Image (spheres, helix red, strand yellow):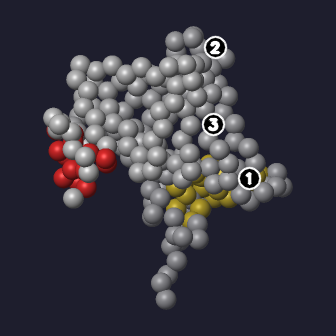
Amino acid sequence: MKKRKKNYQTVRDGTKDSETRRGHISDDEVLSAYCIRSGYDELHYVQLDADGVRPGWTIIRAPGVTQIKTGDDVGDDTNALVLEALRGDIFIKAHKGRIMMEAENIQGIALGKNNKNGVITFEADEKFEVKAKNIEMNGSSVARFFCSGVLQVVGDGAVEMFAGLADCATGATKIRKSKYPSTVEFRENARLV
């Protein structure tokens, strides 16, 4: 049988309202340098872990709402709240709810130094909606829209398409070929074979 870790310098102090622990060893054999816990709910605590599977971890647990409100005295062009991960990912998850962001402007930037990075990805099981007065999408190299089902382009007023050179093909060209086939038609005919 494995012997449990012991710390002979553990200090615990508290009242009915709260307790503090220094050098506490948790059930999974992790030494906590410091822990402060509410006396009204055991799931309400702040803990600084030191070793084991959580070296250097800071855990904040709240059974109710956790609110951070800051920036009363900062200027308009000053960062009021900074979350910075020097290494690793930043993971935000809502098990039974939404993740909402609200601001005058929202900016997302992906910086990549090669062709594998610098990517922004959105995935949705059902629908991806974008609603705005004006929508602009600019691709400096390629802009591609693909749909495995039906792709609809609808303009209630008008649909305008401009190109230096337009190249189009449909499945019908497999049966009745164009008089002057294009590169797109060659590619589509090869795919449909």
Instruction: Name the residue beneath numbered marker 3.
Output: 100
What's under tag 2, amino acid-wise?
Asp
Measured Cα–Cα span from mark 3 to mark 2: 25 Å
User: For this rendering, which residue is in front, 153 or 127?
Assistant: 153
Q: Position of residue 37 (x, y in %)?
A: 71, 53
Q: Residue at x 21, y 44 (%)?
A: 177
What's under tag 1, amino acid-wise?
Pro
**Quadrant in which the C terminus is drawn:** bottom left
Measured Cα–Cα span from mark 3 to mark 1: 20 Å
Disc with the residue nearer the chain's start (2 vs 1): 1
Q: Does residue 37 appear in the picture of this structure?
A: no
Instruction: Name the residue beneath numbered marker 1.
Output: 63
- Which element is circle 1 on? loop
Q: Is residue 13 above or below residue 176?
A: below
Q: Where residue 73 is drawn, which disc sits there?
A: 2
Callout 3: few (<14), some (14-19), or many (20+) C-alpha neighbours within 10 Å?
Answer: few
Q: Residue at x 46, y 22 (%)?
A: 159
Q: Position of residue 6 (x, y in %)?
A: 53, 71
Callout 1: few (<14), some (14-19), or many (20+) C-alpha neighbours within 10 Å?
Answer: few
Q: Does residue 176 appear in the picture of this structure?
A: yes
Q: Is residue 83 above or below residue 63?
A: above
Q: Nearer the viewer, mark 3 or mark 2?
A: 3
Q: Position of residue 132 (x, y in %)?
A: 57, 23
User: For this rendering, which residue is in front, 148 or 129?
Assistant: 148
Disc with the residue nearer the chain's start (3 vs 2): 2
Measured Cα–Cα span from mark 2 to mark 1: 30 Å
Q: Nearer the viewer, mark 3 or mark 1?
A: 3
Q: Residue at x 45, y 50 (%)?
A: 149
Count of numbered tags: 3
Left or right, 165 with respect to 37, comes to left
Q: Is residue 38 above or below residue 169?
A: below
What's under tag 3, amino acid-wise?
Met
